[in-house]
Amino acid sequence: MFDVLTLPPRLVAQAVEDLHTLATTLRKLTEEEGDLARLREAATTLPEVEDELTAGVASLQEDVKPLAGKVSKLSSTAAALDEDLGGLDEHVVALDGNLQGLDKNLVGLDGTAGSLVRSMATLNDQMSVLITEIQGFRGDIAELRDKIPGL
């Protein structure tokens, strides 16, 4: 192959440095605290972690099964409620029309109430006059009673 003497010294120095880098890296990887040790530890604990995750997923599936039935019932209840609200919407529209008519009637009623108050004031005056006349009539009857013997 190559004769060692024909290689340039710079190339030999680079090769020796690369070999040193490889040896150092390999030593670090294989040390007790090295990356390979951690990788080996992770690989040995992976089946345990996988079993725990599988058990957790199975437990979640068992927890979710009853919820599926409840969600189905909730969905049908929501659909029935939606139908009921659809009919309610028609009633609200009709009620709104009735309230508008009632509002118009109340405006007219307000004028009627004012007229009634004025009439009551007149009636109150008439009642005062009538009470005065009735009291005078009582006085007249009392005088007649005194004039009629035996009463």
Image (cartoon, rainbow, N blue to C red):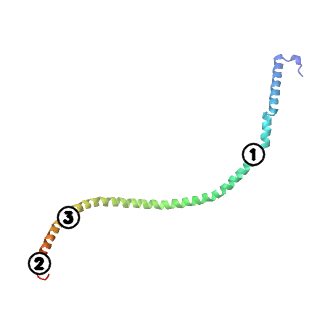
> 61 left or right of 94?
right
Q: Residues within 10 Å of mark 3 (few under 14, many from 20)?
A: few
Q: Which residue is mark 3?
A: 124
Q: Measured from the top left, where is residue 37 in percent x and y?
A: 80, 36
Identified by mark 3, the residue type is Asn
Secondary element at tag 3: helix
Q: Residues within 10 Å of mark 2 (few under 14, many from 20)?
A: few
Q: Residues within 10 Å of mark 1 (few under 14, many from 20)?
A: few
Picture disc at residue 49: 1
- Residue lying at the far left in this picture: please name it: 147
Quarter of the N terminus within the rendering: top right
Name the N-terminal-most of marks 1 and 3. 1
Q: Measured from the top left, where is residue 17 in percent x and y?
A: 81, 22
Identified by mark 2, the residue type is Asp
How much space separates mark 2 and mark 1, taking CA atoms?
Answer: 122 Å
Q: At 69% from the left edge and 56% from the top edge, which residue is drawn?
A: 62
Q: Measured from the top left, where is residue 15 in percent x and y?
A: 82, 22
Seen from the viewer's position, the closer of residues 136 and 23 is 136
Badge 3 vs badge 2, beta-carbon distance below 8 Å? no
> 62 left or right of 129?
right
Secondary element at tag 1: helix
**Mark 1 vs mark 3: in front:** 3
| For residue 62, above or below residue 43 | below
Identified by mark 1, the residue type is Val
Q: At 13% from the left edge and 72% from the top edge, which residue is drawn?
A: 139
Q: Splitting the image into 4 quarters, where does residue 3 fall?
A: top right
Q: Which residue is mark 2?
A: 146
